Amino acid sequence: MRVLALAAACLSLLGIASAADAATPVKGASPGHLHGFLLRADEPVADSFPRTPSFAWDPVPGAVRYQFQLSTSASFRDSGLLYTATNLMTPVAAPQLTLPWITGNPHALFARVRAIKRSSSTPWSTPFGFDMEPSAAPKPLPSEPGLLRWTPIEGADMYQIWLIDINNPTSKMEMSLTNVLDEREFYTFHRSASWTGTIRWRIRALRMDNDPSARQNHLPAVAYGPWSPVYTSTNPAYSTGPITLDDTISDVTATGDGSSPAHRLMPGFTFSGDTTIEGTRAELFRVYVFTDRQCLNRVYTGAIVGGPAYAPRPYGPLTLPASPTGLPAARANYLRDGSEPDSFMFDGLPVKSTESEPAASPTTAVPADSDSTSTTSAPAGPTQLKFSGDLGAPVDLWDTEWPSGGYYWTVVAVAAVSPGAITTATAGVSAVGSVSTTAMDGVGFSTGDTVLIGNAGNQESATIVTVSGSNIGFASPLKFAHGTGEPIVRTGGNLQYVDLELPQDVCAEGRVARFGKNSEPSLTAAGELFASGLSPSGRLTAGKSSQAFYGYPLVAWTPALGASAYEVQWSKTRYPFAPQPNSQNQGALGTMTLGTSAVLPLGAGTWWYRVRGFNLNLPTGAQQMSWSDPSKIVVAKPKFKVVGGG
């Protein structure tokens, strides 16, 4: 009698799998029905995909594992190989790499698979040809004056916006992590319709490529999709009068009264008017976000804009003029990106925009979840993802339990102020050639200020480049020695940008609105599980609530707005959800991936799994988004039956 495993991984689990490889004699039929899919192996067969697909094929009786390859060559030449997996235990694969946009005649990418048995291997399957084509470019959505808005693209990590009519000296490209962009270049120090009336723009979606070396032959995979056509947006004349808050806008439009839905993406903030509560007219504005109605606990500081809208940018604010002589040039040109000069709130406290914060770092390990009861000493989170490049400042906001919890925002007027002369004295000795001195009081001095230091016999001019407490640094070495008590007089001050109102005061006057921010959970099912794998009867199957899998199943999920990476965890109980160690990743609690599918290394039994996205534009260590609802999945024990004699 001879006993054959009906499931592909049975012999491997029993510990009798051999190390069959390319040199093994070829025997038996190759795997059939190899195809790609996004969510379930039984979805209609497609040959073009907007993101890296998963793959499945018919199982081969007696197989102990499978070898799988992706290539740009139908003959799978060595130089064309993109990806190789050699130890797949079930007839599914979830390649963890970004595939390039590529099309052919009829196809440009190819997949193949073969089964490895105890003492032989099957021929390679017939290649499955397919292409990678990006989704269509974003399209404009209704918005408010001063704010561009577009349709979010599934799977996009960021957007690049080309402001067609700005050339100083090259075309201006801006980045947005959400689906809105303010028109600050057109409004800042400009009010006439010739600057703000008509805005022409193009846009394309960007995706993240975390590790180019994941592609075996290092074939480049660009981060961008196609440019849109040229879009035109128009704005009415700038409205004057008291500053009034309007809507917050992203994937939804929220009115601020608590009845609107929460934003899934970081919103843009719109307002109108230009007059403070004291009656002063202004041409610059700043948005603040708080956790409390009194506007005390500030969690986000907007960059200075010319209004009437603000939306976060991850790569910094405009380069505002630093001296009074720079104002005429600013009024005659579009400002470039760069840095804001010293800025102060109405009460004199220094303030810096969140856009100017250091770039966030990707979170690859997080604290254990509050509902976890695991006592294992395994790492709290998976750590295998690699990221490169500048992710930008953390210009997003944390989740709230809307509508019970939310954020409060307001906008205040800002003015460019040229400070007057101030005087202090040296607090120590500075030798010839020193590039700094210690002052009795450094308050009021700023980078770019011009000062006179010394008495009549040793007086000299210097330009300040750093101020740290009472220590003042200069652009060039001092030519004279200076003793304690010698005067330091500011003769020419840089522009400072000063709030004309205190957030606490304007919020108390009613200039405050509320909004919610809830991250979007991924979906792991739509009636039936997005799961595929081997059935206990030895067939390729897609998940059904009453059906079990044999061996490792592949699970998939929908992309979440704002997510650039995903974490999957599994537990033996739904509640409390106790994440189990990943035997294939040094015992980490789950796995992380840039893709939207993963093969779960589950043993026999009933399991629950969940998925959450990671928003890399939140502060490092706090980038995790909402978990999906736990989904039940059953893995059956190995079954055998007699199929012949001899």
Image (cartoon, rainbow, N blue to C red):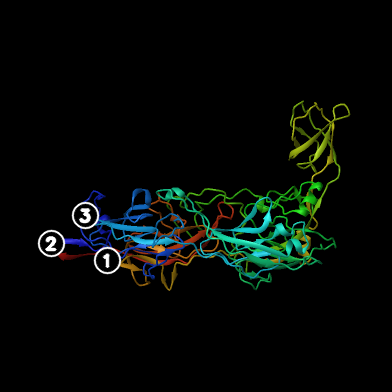
Q: Please tell me how many numbered marks the rendered image carries.
A: 3
Structural distance between the alpha carbons of marks 3 and 2:
24 Å
Q: Give the percent coordinates (x, y) of residue 394.
A: 61, 53
Drawn side of residue 517 relative to residue 529, left or right: right
What's the residue type where badge 1 is placed?
Gly
Q: Which residue is mark 3?
A: 26
Residue on which disc 2 sits: 1
Q: Nearer the viewer, residue 86 or 17?
A: 86
Residue identifier under label 1: 538
Identify the residue at image location x=76%, y=38%: 464
Whichever of callouts 3 and 2 sits on the residue coming sooner in the sequence is 2
Q: CA distance from mark 1 to mark 2?
A: 20 Å
Please state which amino acid type lies under the numbered disc 3: Val
Q: Quadrant of residue 124?
A: bottom left
Are there few (<14), some (14-19), or many (20+) residues within 10 Å of tag 2? Answer: few
Residue 89 image-quadrant placement: bottom left
